[in-house]
Amino acid sequence: MSPRFRWLFVALTAALLLVTFDFAHGQDAPYPHIPKTSPLADRMRQIERAQLAQELERSASPQIALYSDLFTGAVSRSGPADPFTPDNPRAAVYTFTMPANVSILLAEVMETTALDLDLFVGFDSNGDGLPEWGETICYSAMVGQLDWCALRRPTAGPFWIVAYSYRGSDAVLDDFRIDINGFGSEVTYSSSAALDDGKYIRIGDVVSFTVKVQPPMPRTTPLSYTITSILPDGLERVAPVPPDTARASQTTSEEWSIATSGEGAQILFEAVVEPEVALDTNLTTELTYTAGDERHGRLTSDLYVMGVVLQITATSAPTAPLGSAAPFTVTVTNLGVAPAGNLTATVVLPPGAEHVAGGVLEGGQVHWPIQLLEAGASVDLPLSLRLWVTPATTQTVQAPTARIVGGEEAEPGAWPWQVALWDMGVNEWWGCGGSLIGPYWVLTAAHCVTSGSFVVPASSIGAAIGRHHVDSNEGYVIGASAVLVHPLYDDFTAGYDVALLRLTAAAPLSGAVAFVPLATVADAPAYAPGAPAITTGWGTRDYWSWDFPSGLYQVEVPIYDDNACSEAYARIYGNNVIDDSMICAGLPEGGKDACQGDSGGPLVVRDGGNLWRQVGITSWGYRCAYPDAPGIYSRIPKFVDWITGEMHTVRLENYSVTDGSNAPGRSATGAAAAATVFVETPSTVWAPLITSGSAPSR
């Protein structure tokens, strides 16, 4: 175990041992099913927080706290398990009105004496001032750090926050302090043809400019603003649009005054592009403002009179026979008024795709030279791609020892499809497992790669393949090029807890690396109640402990009857906890199970031909190896069509055109993917599936 990894484990152990549920195998919650995957959840939250900071830093307009307040109070350690029960002493509620222009709302538990205080944020859609689960937009239920919620571009209007004592201290009441900050731009300035929006202007165009003002809140005294607009030569003002007369007044053709106690205001004006403006000319417009004696600022909006305006789109066949070559077409168009020359169109070869024909393949990219493209002209560039064919593999796994919790260490190479999800940022185990199901594909649990609505960036995660000791350098580490979460995944109920990692390179096959076939409904006898199944992983070997093994562990657990599993969990959580996207495995008396850290790993059974097939993905459960609480796995036959559909899809996502000058309008990138699904039944339909356009970029 690396020093950094060991330090992370030690630092979070104390917090973890205080928690009464975990979701990796999974959780033990009074309300289903909030993930508590430390250190996994904490690591994902760190990545998400870093992205928030980058968003604020990259903002074109200065970001300040447009809303800033404190939510303080005290909650009891006892009361109903449902955070949304009215007058629940375990929950405290705060309501507020979100102002306009907020780009990121951050609600963060800064202090609490509770051992675990969870956070819920929602939009009060019915205006009754009462929180409801159906109104929830964000929740946070972490283990190793204080909880926080972030909302991007929230709607202005009524909101609520719930602080819920998941686990209280020994005190009668636990105090807490939650900071609420809505970051945004006090003054925003934009145009209908701003360069940053990828638009362009031509001689004679009328450009609309919009100024929005939102003073920081809460505020008890009025604030006066002075707004001044400065236009460069080449733009002439036209008749001004009447301002928001309730709060704004125009003092000159270039200046406005606004007085407000917190309400937002908007100013509109227009300008026309004059005939003498030359092509390829940059026009910088300027806006200055003062906010009483408190603040002042300057904003700009660049316009560009472009001669060349490139656009690139792509189309593809919706389906193609498996093993055949599918046609794609990349179209480059010059929407400008001047010819474009010496262009190069480029397509990055999608992972899992083979280049058959079209363009010149070099270093994983396909290129087409375009010597001349007249104004208004287009050129179609044909491309043929084929899905990479998976070579045949044999399974060389030995019969398992029929004894993770209640299991024992596997023989090295015994389960050649087992992978460890890998943190590419710190080069350590991510805290979840997965299975290799194709040369470019890893199957895992959705909760291993998500935190609420946040999906881990592909650049942050990968897979360690062909590895027995998780803290060794055995096998290979391959990064991910995409993270795909099932569209029906519900992080509260844990339904459809499945995700795919598309790898950046094909996994090299060997005796220690092989693919596992996926079970379908046709394999139902293999996973009938009582059928033996094997689950594997590097998770802890004892609930409430930090007993993580170095070597891969295995345990045999029989498939549980669906009705018996539903009844068992109804006694713990209430009715309708187990749905048809889940399959259960374990012993009525307990003693054998997956546990925290095994999430995402495979549950396999033998089919009639003595071949191992994966039937489940380790998802969640009440404690680990607890009597009458079998482990819950995602039921692969329920969504195997989605998995194979994604694996058999070639997406053209990265394509562009440029003349190399970096001038506005003289380069463009594709705005969306063109995709073909390769199916076993031959298809004769060759109509375009997706067309994606783009506006020029710098």
Image (cartoon, rainbow, N blue to C red):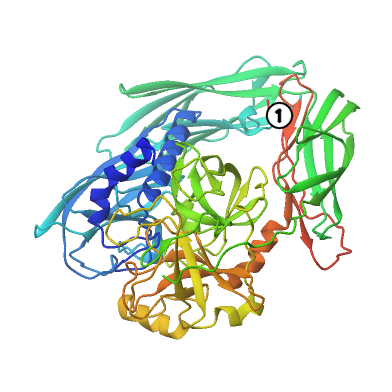
Label 1: element kind: loop
Type of amino acid at the residue the image marks with label 1: Tyr
Q: Count numbered badges in the picture.
A: 1
Q: Where is the C terminus found, in terms of image quarters?
A: top right
Q: Which of the pair 515/203 is nearer the observer? A: 515
The quarter of the displayed image where residue 564 is located:
bottom left
Residue 344 shown left or right of residue 144 in the figure: right
Q: Which of the pair 12/379 is nearer the observer? A: 12
Q: How crowded is mark 1: few (under 14 residues within 10 Å), some or many (20 or more)?
A: many
Residue 375 shown left or right of residue 183 in the figure: right
> Do we see residue 536 in this rendering?
yes
- Tell me where residue 693 appears, x and y as whole percent: 74, 42
Residue 129 vertical placement versus 179 (above, below): below
Q: State the residue at coordinates (37%, 54%).
A: 37
Q: Where is the N terminus found, in terms of image quarters?
A: top left
The quarter of the displayed image where residue 35 is located:
bottom left
> Do we see residue 337 in this rendering?
no
- Tell me where residue 68 appears, x and y as whole percent: 29, 39
Disc 1: which residue = 200
Q: Which of the pair 345/375 is nearer the observer? A: 345
Q: Which of the pair 50/100 is nearer the observer? A: 50
Residue 307 vertical placement versus 107 (above, below): above
Residue 43 shown left or right of residue 495 in the figure: left
- Tell me where residue 147 appears, x and y as whole percent: 30, 49
- Tell me where residue 322 appears, x and y as whole percent: 81, 60
